[in-house]
Image (cartoon, helix red, strand yellow):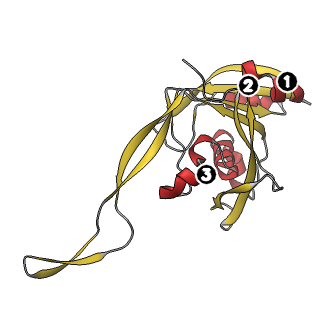
C-alpha cells in the first residue's frame, strides 16, 4: 500500500494527559490517542463532523520531538471546602500545582491513502491538543507501508496502534464514543526523541 504523508512541525506541542496527576503511569503526553487523531482528522476534514466516531482518512501517524519541557500549571480542583475566615464560615476552592510537559520541536507525520486527502491536509495547520501550539505542514512525501514502518531516518517516532491485544494498555476514555475505554500498543521506530 502506498501512503501520501504530510509532515507537520512547530516549536511547541502539548498533549493533554488523560491521567491528570497520574501521568507518570502511562506517559500519555508523548503519543496520540484515537480520540486525538479523530479530532485532528475532523479539524482537517470538517465534513466528518456529521459522521459517527471513527477514523476515516488518517491511515497512520508518527510523532517525534526534541525533548519535553516540564511546566507547572495552577489548577482548582472541582470540590469546595468550608473554612473559617475572620470568624465566618466561607466556601473556598483550594489551588493545586500540576507538572505537565510541553513537546519541544514536535514533528508529526500523518499518512493518507488518497493523494487528494493529503493535499487538503497539506494546505492547513493543526494542533495536537492546545490551540496556541500550531504545527505547520512542511513537506508532502510518498512512501510504501513498508518504508513507513522501517525508515527510521525519515519516519522516526511514536505511534499508538489502535487495537486491543496482549501488548495493549488503556490510554483513556473516548468522549466522542460514550466514554468507552480506548486501548492501543506503542510502536516505536528509530529514536523518537531527537538528539541536538
Quarter occupied by the C terminus? top right
Residue 26 disc label: 3
| Residue 90 sits above or below residue 73 on the image | below
Residues packed near mark 3 inside 10 Å, few (<14), some (14 to 19) or many (20 plus):
some
Is label 1 in a helix, a strand or a loop? helix
Alpha-carbon distance for marks 2 and 3? 23 Å
Residues under numbered marks 2 and 1 in contact, where contact means CB atoms less than 8 Å apart: yes
Please state the horizontal and vertical placement of residue 38, each as a whole percent of the image: 69, 48
Would residue 74 be found to the left or right of residue 46 on screen? left
Who comes first in sequence, dot 2 or dot 3? 3
Name the element at disc 3.
loop
Categorize mark 2 by other alpha carbons within 10 Å: few (<14), some (14-19), many (20+).
many
Question: SS for tag 2?
Answer: helix
Residue 74 vs 190, above or below: the answer is below
Question: Of callouts 3 and 1, which one flags the residue occurring earlier in the amino acid sequence?
Answer: 3
Q: Mark 2, mark 3: which one is toward the viewer?
A: 3
The residue labelled by disc 2 is 155
| Proximity of marks 2 and 3: CB atoms separated by less than 8 Å | no
Work out how far the residue at label 3 is from the one at label 1, CA to CA, in angstroms. 28 Å
- Placement of 103 over or under 153, stated as above or below: below
Image quadrant assignment for residue 135: top right
Q: At 37% across and 49% down in the image, what residue appears?
A: 73
Mark 3 or 1: in front is: 3
Amino acid at each position: 500500500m502506498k501512503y501520501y504523508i504530510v509532515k507537520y512541525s512547530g516549536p511547541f506541542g502539548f498533549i493533554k494527559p488523560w491521567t491528570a496527576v497520574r501521568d507518570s503511569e502511562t506517559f500519555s503526553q508523548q503519543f496520540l490517542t484515537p480520540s486525538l487523531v479523530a479530532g485532528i482528522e475532523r479539524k482537517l476534514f470538517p465534513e466528518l463532523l456529521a459522521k459517527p466516531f471513527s477514523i476515516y482518512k488518517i491511515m497512520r501517524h508518527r510523532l517525534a520531538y526534541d525533548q519535553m519541557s516540564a511546566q507547572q500549571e495552577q489548577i482548582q480542583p472541582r470540590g469546595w471546602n468550608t473554612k473559617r475566615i475572620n470568624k465566618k464560615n466561607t466556601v473556598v476552592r483550594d489551588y493545586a500545582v500540576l507538572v505537565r510537559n510541553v513537546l519541544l520541536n514536535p514533528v508529526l507525520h500523518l499518512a493518507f491513502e488518497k493523494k487528494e486527502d493529503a493535499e487538503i491536509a497539506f494546505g492547513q495547520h493543526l494542533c495536537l491538543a492546545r490551540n496556541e501550539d500550531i504545527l505547520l505542514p512542511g513537506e508532502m512525501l510518498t512512501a510504501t507501508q513498508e518504508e513507513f514502518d522501517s525508515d527510521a531516518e525519515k519516519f522516526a517516532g511514536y505511534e499508538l496502534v489502535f487495537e486491543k491485544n496482549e501488548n495493549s494498555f488503556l490510554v483513556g476514555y473516548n468522549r466522542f464514543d460514550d466514554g468507552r475505554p480506548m486501548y492501543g500498543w506503542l510502536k516505536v521506530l528509530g529514536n523518537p526523541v531527537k538528539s541536538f
